[in-house]
């Protein structure tokens, strides 16, 4: 198995010789600036072997920028300050140089070769070789073993473009963890993972700790930060504002440091009164293009009421996002979907048809399907409202500016100006631009797929309250989420899905966490 990246598991690895709790990585006065923005200011940290050092902070706090400096995404001559690994000064020109030294990063926005297979992505740049040729037999068998370890139900030969974003995330994590690494950087690794997949990830991180590998962990989910961390650092506005052992950092202190003040209740009170049914979905059925006689979504039917937040909950692969895409005419495959809007049959063949019916959609995959990252914040907000902002094909710029400013203030989007390109913004602020687009378009029905993914505690709270305000104003919201806590905190009703079917619909005020988890994982007696 010469050349195999996993052969190292059966040999004495260099990282095994690292002493536990020894300082391995030192950051001194790191400062990174973009046009008009100082993303990181004078950041200094020490990271030890065999520990999980979590970095938390609001969107735009500088967490991801700091990681990109460490990982070689930003070359050493584009920022000030120094990085030392095992006492040696590092001047990485690119990601490959950092990886050769033992620093690997799992980024928030995944970079994968969509046309290549799962196996080829796992072994990227390190294909096993036999007689001068790629040893596909070894590569596929090793990939299958890793897939089994991570609980992934895909084939090694499956192209990456054919699998879901959560499965892609686990593949990227596997790729990084099975290379020879000294410091592993994880940027929002659980954003798209189910509870079960999170447990697998945490087990793998624990394995890394036992090998004395240092892990730097970024997450907005404070409960998992508290569960997995040895040390917690808080960043705000590009600066490090506090570092302490986990035992000395309770959630109240973390949030206070993150936002610079106390935060009110996260979820609004359940005092909404949903009205009449506005949208009826009947018999959504999607055939699996890869497996004959298998259904991705199996005759799913439900109603959503005016002034209601209806949450779709289930594990990854339950068919929630696929159901939404079928409703929007955006699923690429054999689909059956009957819909009635305000009691009248409608037919949606494309997302543009959905916009005409005042149905807005915030996609799970923000980077590929949501934002136009080469466009400005303002243009991302107004692109679905141009007809309302124009008269005789002439754009009313004053009205456009007012709309943009209203959305920026309402969603607390952190941007120097409305002209800032979305590609220069944090992931959470980019997400808020997409939500702002449909608020600006005055959509009557909002389908929000993982709307709080990668968003900090304060911004999540703002979005929950905005959703509450929208529902109270008569909007109907279909909320898809893998976070059961927020589903229970915000929903009027919870629709639980499993294996493409509706298991149950529960009143949000009477929902029981254990019962919903049971339904999502085991199902019910009728199945």
Image (cartoon, rainbow, N blue to C red):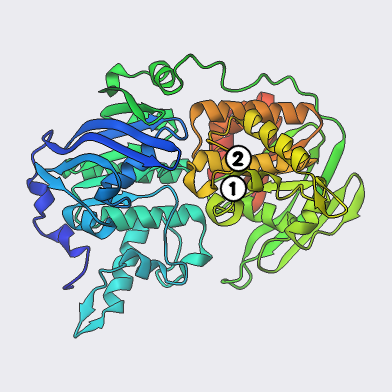
Q: Looking at the image, can residue 272 be seen?
A: yes
Q: What element does badge 2 sit on? A: loop
The numbered disc on residue 465 is none
Looking at the image, is 287 positioned above or below residue 314? below
The residue to which callout 1 is attached is 376
Determine whether, in the image, residue 435 is placed left or right of residue 213: right
Tell me: residue 508, above or below residue 122.
above
- Cα distance between the residues tagged 2 and 1: 7 Å
Looking at the image, which residue sits at the far right? 344
Q: How far from the left and from the top, in percent, is residue 320?
A: 63, 50
Residue 449 shows in the view: no
Q: On the image, which quarter does residue 509 sit in?
A: top right
Q: Position of residue 435 (x, y in %)?
A: 65, 41
Locate residue 401 relative to residue 376 in the image: left or right.
right
Q: Residue at x 19, y 42 (%)?
A: 83
Left/right placement of residue 126 relative to residue 196 reads left
Residue shown at 65%/67% (left/top)?
332
- The residue under the point 65% across, 48% down is 379
Mark 1: which secondary structure?
loop
Q: Residue at x 79, y 31 (%)?
A: 307
**Along the line of sight, which residue is nearer the eye, 85 or 501?**
85
Disc 2 + disc 1, Cβ < 8 Å: yes
Which quarter of the figure has residue 468?
top right
Specify whether 23 is left or right of 389: left
Label 1 neighbourhood size at 10 Å, few (<14), some (14-19), many (20+)?
some
Count neighbours of disc 2 (C-alpha within 10 A) and say few if under 14, some if 14 to 19, many if 20 or more.
some
Point out which mark residue 418 bears: 2
How far across and how far down the image is residue 324, in percent?
A: 68, 52
Label tally: 2
Residue 25 position, x and y percent, is: 17, 39
Q: Earlier in the sequence, mark 2 or mark 1?
A: 1
């Amino acid at each position: 198995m010469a050349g195999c990246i996993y052969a190292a598991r059966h040999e004495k690895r260099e990282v095994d010789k690292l002493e536990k709790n020894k300082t391995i990585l030192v950051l001194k006065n790191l400062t990174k600036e973009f046009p008009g923005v100082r993303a990181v200011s004078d950041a200094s940290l020490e990271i030890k072997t065999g520990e999980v050092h979590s970095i938390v902070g609001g969107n735009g706090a500088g967490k991801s920028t700091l990681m990109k400096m460490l990982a070689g995404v930003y070359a050493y001559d584009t920022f000030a300050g120094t990085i030392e690994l095992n006492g040696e000064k590092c001047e990485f020109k690119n990601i490959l140089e950092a990886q050769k030294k033992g620093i690997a990063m799992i980024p928030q926005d995944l970079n994968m070769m969509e046309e290549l297979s799962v196996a080829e992505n796992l072994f990227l740049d390190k294909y096993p070789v036999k007689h001068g040729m790629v040893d596909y037999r070894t590569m596929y068998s090793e990939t299958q073993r890793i897939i089994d370890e991570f609980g992934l139900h895909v084939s090694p030969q499956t192209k990456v473009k054919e699998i879901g974003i959560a499965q892609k995330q686990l593949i990227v994590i596997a790729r990084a963890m099975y290379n020879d690494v000294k410091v592993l950087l994880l940027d929002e690794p659980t954003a798209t993972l189910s509870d079960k997949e999170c447990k697998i990830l945490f087990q793998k991180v624990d394995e890394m700790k036992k090998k004395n590998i240092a892990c730097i962990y970024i997450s907005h989910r404070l409960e998992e930060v508290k569960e997995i961390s040895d040390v917690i650092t808080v960043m705000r506005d590009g600066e490090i504002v506090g570092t302490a052992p986990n035992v000395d950092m309770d959630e109240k202190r973390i949030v206070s440091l993150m936002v610079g003040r106390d935060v009110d209740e996260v979820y609004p009170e359940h005092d909404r009164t949903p009205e009449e049914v506005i949208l009826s979905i009947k018999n959504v059925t999607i055939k699996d293009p890869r497996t004959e006689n298998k259904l991705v979504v199996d005759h799913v039917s439900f109603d959503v009421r005016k002034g209601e937040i209806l949450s779709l909950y289930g594990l990854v692969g339950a068919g929630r996002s696929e159901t939404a895409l079928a409703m929007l005419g955006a699923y690429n495959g054999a689909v059956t979907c009957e819909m009635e809007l305000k009691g009248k049959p409608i037919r949606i063949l494309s997302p543009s048809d959905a916009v005409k019916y005042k149905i807005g959609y915030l996609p799970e995959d923000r980077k590929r399907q949501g934002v136009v990252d080469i466009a400005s914040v303002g243009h991302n907000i107004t692109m679905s409202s141009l007809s309302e902002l124009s008269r005789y094909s002439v754009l009313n710029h004053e009205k456009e500016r007012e709309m943009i400013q209203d959305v920026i203030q309402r969603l607390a989007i952190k941007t120097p100006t409305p002209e800032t390109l979305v590609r220069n913004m944090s992931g959470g602020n980019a997400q808020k631009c997409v939500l702002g687009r449909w608020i600006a378009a005055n959509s009557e029905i909002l389908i929000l797929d993982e709307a709080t993914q990668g968003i900090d505690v304060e911004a999540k709270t703002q979005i929950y309250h905005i959703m509450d305000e929208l529902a109270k104003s008569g909007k109907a919201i279909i909320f898809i989420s893998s976070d059961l806590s927020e589903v229970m905190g915000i929903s009027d009703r919870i629709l639980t899905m499993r294996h493409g079917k509706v298991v149950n619909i529960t009143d949000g005020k009477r929902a029981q966490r254990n019962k919903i988890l049971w339904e999502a994982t085991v199902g019910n007696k009728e199945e």
